[in-house]
Image: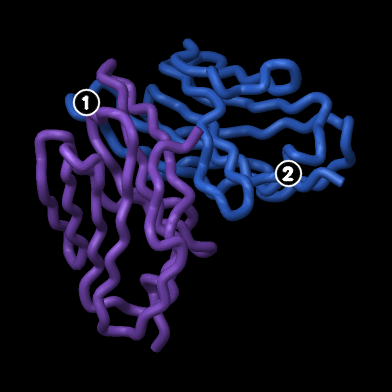
Amino acid sequence: EAGVAQSPRYKIIEKRQSVAFWCNPISGHATLYWYQQILGQGPKLLIQFQNNGVVDDSQLPKDRFSAERLKGVDSTLKIQPAKLEDSAVYLCASSRPGLAGGSEQFFGPGTRLTVL
Amino acid sequence: SQQGEEDPQALSIQEGENATMNCSYKTSINNLQWYRQNSGRGLVHLILIRSNEREKHSGRLRVTLDTSKKSSSLLITASRAADTASYFCATDATNSGYSTLTFGKGTMLLVSP
């Protein structure tokens, strides 16, 4: 099966500009996640969708970050305006929901964002 | 905040040796997962162990879980250069049917030929 697709793979912007990332999960995976991974750290969950509803966005900086998942498939994550500390890799993941005891997540290749 | 804390932060071994990484966490969990990340293949799931399990094997991987000590270990036997990567433990504390993971900072493993 095809994996999680993300684009672009790399993006360089100046601070205060806006940027958007796109994710296409594995077909049939109802749960979609966006993570931020700063160099030297583990991924941090930003937002989690179940179909097109938000399950958890407690760590999303809502003053500048937004995300949507229209029709319960593709998702976009936007940053507006960007700050220097937003430089990171943004990872999208998907999983099958509802398995007793939890389920594994499948990750895309990520988008490396550099804010100058 | 990151719940899992891996130990050591970095590990350097020779091919053929075993590598052991540890993970400690703070709250009750539903399951604990280990992931590997390298530049070639991104972040890949290795193994999931549920809170009612104590040990699990997958190929050269062995994972243990001690919920009384809130700790887990990942053992890689007969390591290969291709095992060079960062290894993360991730805890799932939800019981809702949606897995929500909290990752640690990871252990960087270097396997030299």
Q: Which residue is mark 1?
A: A99
Q: How is the image coloured?
A: by chain
**Image side of residue A111 versus residue A15, left or right:** left
- Drawing shade for chain A: blue
* Residue drawn 58% across the image and 44% down it: A37
Residue nearest the viewer, comparing A25 with B21: B21
Q: Position of residue A13 (x, y in %)?
A: 85, 42
Q: Position of residue A70 (x, y in %)?
A: 56, 15
Question: Could you tell me the amino acid type at mark 1?
Answer: Leu
The 10 Å Cα crowd at callout 2, few under 14, some 14 to 19, many 20 or more, is: many
Chain identifier matching the purple colour in the rendered picture: B
* Residue drawn 67% across the image and 34% down it: A21
Q: Quadrant of residue A20?
A: top right
Q: Residue furthest front?
A: B69
Residue nearest the viewer, comparing A34 with A57: A57
Residue nearest the viewer, comparing A65 with A98: A65
Question: Could you tell me the amino acid type at mark 2?
Answer: Ser
* 1 or 2: tag closer to the N-terminus: 2
Q: Position of residue A94 (x, y in %)?
A: 42, 33
**Image side of residue A112 versus residue B8, left or right:** right
For residue A87, which numbered disc appears in the image? 2
SS of the residue under disc 1: loop
Answer above or below: position of B74 versus A53.
below
Labels 1 and 2 touching (C-beta < 8 A): no
- Chain designation of label 1: A
Q: Nearer the viewer, mark 1 or mark 2?
A: 2
